[in-house]
Image (tube, helix red, strand yellow):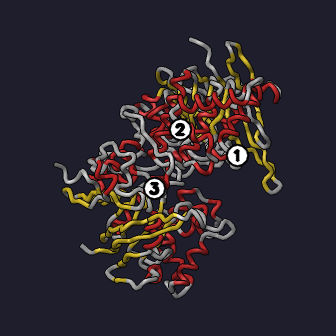
Amino acid sequence: MQKILEVERLTKEYAIGGVLSRQRILANDAVTFHVNAAEVFVLAGESGCGKTTAAKIVLGFEEPTSGVVVHNGKRGVKNVRPWIDEGVQAIFQDPFATFNPLRKVDRYFFETARNYRLASSRRDAVARIDAKLLAVGLSYDEVAGRYPSEFSGGQLQRISIARALMTDPVLLIADEPVSMVDASLRMSIVNLFRKLRDEIGVSVVYITHDLATAYYVGDRIAIMFRGSIVEMGPAEEVLTRPRHPYTRLLRESIPEADPGRKWQSTVRLSDADHEEFMRSGCKFAGRCPVVMDVCHRVVPRDVEDGPVTVKCHRFPPG
Amino acid sequence: MPAPILRTEKLKAFYQLDVQGIPTTVRAVDNVQIAVEENEVYGIAGESGCGKTSLLKALYAAFEPPLRLVGGRVVYTVDGKDVEVTALGPEERRSLRWRFISYVPQGSMSVLNPVSRIRRTYRDFLESHLTGETREHAFRRAKDHLAALGLPKSVLDAYPHQLSGGMRQRVTIALAAILHPRVMIADEPTTALDVVVQRGVVQLLKSVQLGLRNTIILVTHDMGVHANVSDRICIMYAGRIVEEAPTADIFGNPRHPYTRYLINSLPRFGDRSRREGVPGAPPALSRLPPGCPFHPRCPHARRVCAEKNPGYTVVGRSHRAACWLLGDAGDAEDPRG
């Protein structure tokens, strides 16, 4: 299968604290994954797990400390600006912040058409814009001449997806695209990713903390924790038969919309987040219900278990 | 049956705004009639802009311009006696706050003073609400209270920014519970929190409620949270309660088309079949459509739906919904109804 994106041992180090109490944190620690053609790949995890850092590096907004990003087989020079080759487009979390409130929405489309020389005349441009808006369930007539405040969050998010489609990208990077959208409108966005994948073969890196929509739309999933991918594999397998204790905790903590399936036990929380980043060995050891001595000392390796890769000393079992 | 601890009667609270010279009325709370019992978690669900935060402000009797009480009343049952809080003066209202009813806001930073230690916030709070409380006694009380809720007492020496978002929210909940109020109002207490932390915060709320045997009014748009802790749920749409039922019935037998959409659009583990969101977008509360506010999005809308706003039909035990499809319940706007 063709790989649209390969990320190899991506590492990003940040320094936090003052001059005297400087501490270094690995926001990404040897993160490795790939995205196939026409697939929805989910990067999931809680805030501070490094998923947005990985997205920023893939988009070229940040330089990795080490590691390689390969776009469409092209092993990039450092400082590759992938959006220049038109193949990768981004969709952001807050649709109200994406658009300038004082600027008509259609201007973003004409601007993209001009920047990438996508149309030879205004009529050409309008035809292209209309086609892209139709793909997300809107039309040029509904959008032309209107300001962002005239749309709902769900509509604006679909408009920003249509804008991203202007260059016929092969890959969309969507960072928490539904977290600011109302529940009743969320499915329209997520269904759109399915449709784009199935009908025009676009791949999507869907970055989210919402495992329910991840399960609904994802083909493969990577669960991140404190900078590392701790479990990766087919979304169905990872989310219905989680192996890593952290994935299990996440999966159990999602409140299910079913009064018959309530939380069974009381959860234990970490009191200070950055302490977990500083741990040697497995970063989850402080909260892990099945922790062993070795977990506190040695960083676990990636182990293959069936179709899933898991970073845990308990694997392979037995 | 005991009297409800908090009830509203035909409550209307509107924002009176001036939009570029045009007087505009935002009907945020429109004819809301609810009765919240003792010892229950009463859930309020709805999308952003449906009026749920305004309803909470009204229940807390915190009317600040431009929000105005336009009609109806809010009644608390304090020590067995009816108190019409909407008729009280500001001083009397204040005396009920925190002792009888307390509030857990969305962002914990707005309660905790960023430049003083948690200890100081607790002390100021206790000193202003309890007369004759000595400093040492207040501090001991705060420590015992936090320990009883399973929070480390070291948080008292921390500044708010040194705590994680989940810990700050738990400290805020603990503060709201320290005078053992009969009613606690929680407005989206877990937005912006991660799932595991959300679970911890919601479980803390529930354990406080179990311990005090009091009432929690919980607003969240997250139906999963409601499924876990709410005993009863009302669904709010465009400033109105469109359905109210025990939690099992809201999920198992939703009757209003909007509730049905809301429940059916939620993805579930083990089922990847296609799910649809609600078509269209919610209306602006300043420009409500005539008739039932949901009719422009409703696939079952009939002519009457665009003309008259439906009243409530009782569809089961403690289960009511406002929809013309459920029978002729009369016009909600009818002053006699």
CA gap between label 1 and label 3 equals 45 Å
Give the camera-side residue of A297 and B216. A297
Q: CA distance from mark 2 to mark 3?
A: 43 Å
| Res A29 quadrant in image | bottom left
Do the CB atoms of the residues marked 1 and 2 lie less than 8 Å apart?
no
Name the side, left or right, on which A149 lies relative to B280.
right
Dot 1 lies on which element?
loop
Count of all numbered marks drawn on residues in the image: 3
Residue in the foreground of this view, choosing between A206 and A46? A46
Q: Secondary structure at mark 2?
A: loop
Residue at mark 1: B116
Q: Chain of mark 2?
A: B
Which chain is home to disc 1? B
| Residue B143 picture location, percent across and down | 60, 32
Q: Residue at x 42, y 34 (%)?
A: B251
Q: Residue at x 42, y 31 (%)?
A: B253
For label 3, the residue is A188
The quarter of the rendered structure image containing the C terminus of chain B is top right
